[in-house]
Image (cartoon, rainbow, N blue to C red):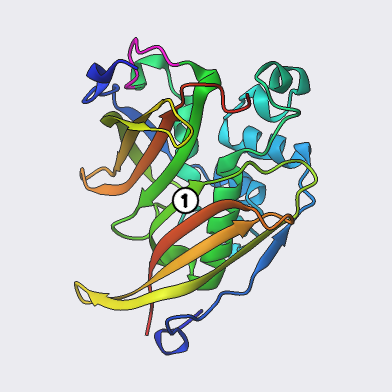
Amino acid sequence: MTTWNALEVGTEGPSWEDGPLTVTDFVRYQGASGDMNPIHHDTEFAQKAGFPKPFAVGMRQAGVLASWATDWLGPANVRRFKVQWREQAWPGDVLTYSGAVTAKREEGGQRLVDVEMVVTRQTGGTHLKGWATFVVPD
Amino acid sequence: MDTSIEGNRGKPFRVVVEEGKVREFARAVKSSNPAYVAEGQPQATSPVTFLASSAFWQDPENSPWGDARLNWERILHGEQEFVFPGPPPGAGTELTAEARIDRVYEKEGKRGGTMTFVELVTEYRDGSGAVVAEARSTIIETSQAPGS
């Protein structure tokens, strides 16, 4: 478990690689979450909506980013987690998950860290940005 | 978009944090953390974004959208936030969830056209009535299909 003294502003978590993404990855998330929107697995449907092919479920990568953050800072310690989607991710993409501490603070008798995170495509494009707050044990 | 939907509430619904669903969800978001996937005991906490999936298993009356007509080809999920006053709820926890349309507002898009933002909030309360999680989704309706 990462401790208070081991974290400074600028401390980075160990980055993750996810991919190449497959439609099977999307379907697995869709089955687990119940979001069966065909735009993520049905090529004909996606093309009718104006996309070249099915694209990744945004909430899947938000979930993977949360997995990344909780492996680093602890599943029970998360207090806030926010993501904003930028460009779509596609089958074949290799995504990199990374992030760093942006603030250390004490509030209501608790020690907290704020972290800023990003999920980047192999093209260098940003798929999503994230912000989280975790309590940190001594 | 009909802005009068602001303040609409869905009928509260029961959510049980199920052990097997937690494990399945954690695997789908690439977690091998024993806190979520270890067999033989209910998990003490659930994955951060797990509760968002509860909305997909509800009836229309639990949704705050009411009769609002959304053009789904022009809808983007722009932002999603989760707030937890303590650790995320563990497996076996029974929660009562209620969704509401918290805010509806418009902005001019960078490439012209009006974008409508809808902030949907779902509160999850435990048996004592305390809020244990709040999920806030920002949905954006664009003036043309995102893929076009």
In magenta segment, residue B66: yes
Residue B49 is at least partly visible in this image: no
Q: Residue at x 39, y 68 (%)?
A: A134
Q: Disc 1 is attached to a residue of which chain?
A: A
The answer to whether B11 appears left or right of B141 in the picture is: left
Residue extent of the magenta highlight: B64-70
Residue A58 is at least partly visible in this image: yes
In which image quadrant can residue A46 be found?
top right
In magenta segment, residue A17: no
Considering only vertical position in the picture, is A49 above or below B92? above
The foreground one among B59 and A58 is A58
Q: Please state which amino acid type lies under the numbered disc 1.
A: Val
Q: Magenta stretch mostly in which secondary structure?
A: loop
- State the quadrant of the N terminus of chain B: top left
- State the quadrant of the C terminus of chain B: top right
Q: Measured from the top left, where is residue B70 in percent x and y?
A: 43, 16
Q: Measured from the top left, where is residue A33 in percent x and y?
A: 57, 36
Considering only vertical position in the picture, is A90 above or below A80? above
Q: Measured from the top left, where is residue A3 in percent x and y?
A: 44, 84
- Which residue is under mark 1? A83
The answer to whether A76 appears left or right of A87 in the picture is: left
Q: Residue at x 77, y 38 (%)?
A: A24
Considering only vertical position in the picture, is A4 above or below B51? below
